[in-house]
Image (cartoon, rainbow, N blue to C red):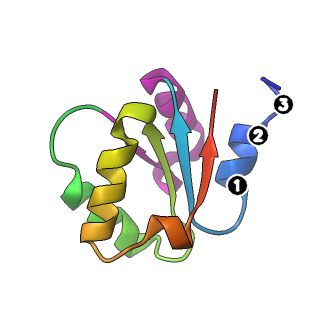
Amino acid sequence: MTGCGATSLAIEQKGPTILAVPFVGLIENKKKRYGDALLGIYGEGDKTAEVAAYLLDHREDYKIAVTYDSLPKLIRTMRALGHDPYKEAFLAIDE
């Protein structure tokens, strides 16, 4: 169901969470609300340094919002940094 707050719930729950969303605008909207607690990943270019710095600061409770297209790139980046998002994170898929 849309508009029920599941996206916010996914961000606010304890534990590592990756939020896959269809539009950059949704990431930007959530970034305005949650600030530095949420990392937004989208667009072209290498995001390794940005992801690495964020994960250092948010080891146990990271929240990353990513567009559908950028999800595979994020997974590869996290694995290269020694994280296994398949084992350690909750994946929420927003419509």
Amino acid at the residue labelled 2: Ala
Magenta stretch: includes residue 36:
yes
Quarter of image, res 13: bottom right
Which mark identifies residue 6?
2
Image location (x, y in percent) of residue 52: 28, 66
Label 3, label 1: how far apart the Cα atoms are: 14 Å
Return the residue at label 1. Answer: 12
Between circles 2 and 1, the one closer to the viewer is 2
Amino acid at the residue labelled 3: Cys
Magenta stretch, residue numbers: 23-42
Magenta stretch: includes residue 34:
yes
Secondary structure of the residue carrying numbered label 3: loop
Secondary structure of the residue carrying numbered label 1: helix
Picture layout, residue 22 above or below residue 20: above
Viewer-closest of 84 and 46: 84
Quarter of image, res 71: top left
Picture layout, residue 38 above or below residue 67: below
Label 1 near label 3: C-beta < 8 Å? Answer: no
Q: Earlier in the sequence, mark 2 or mark 1?
A: 2
Q: Taking 34 as reference, is 39 left or right?
A: left
Image quadrant where one finds the N terminus? top right
Return the residue at label 3. Answer: 4
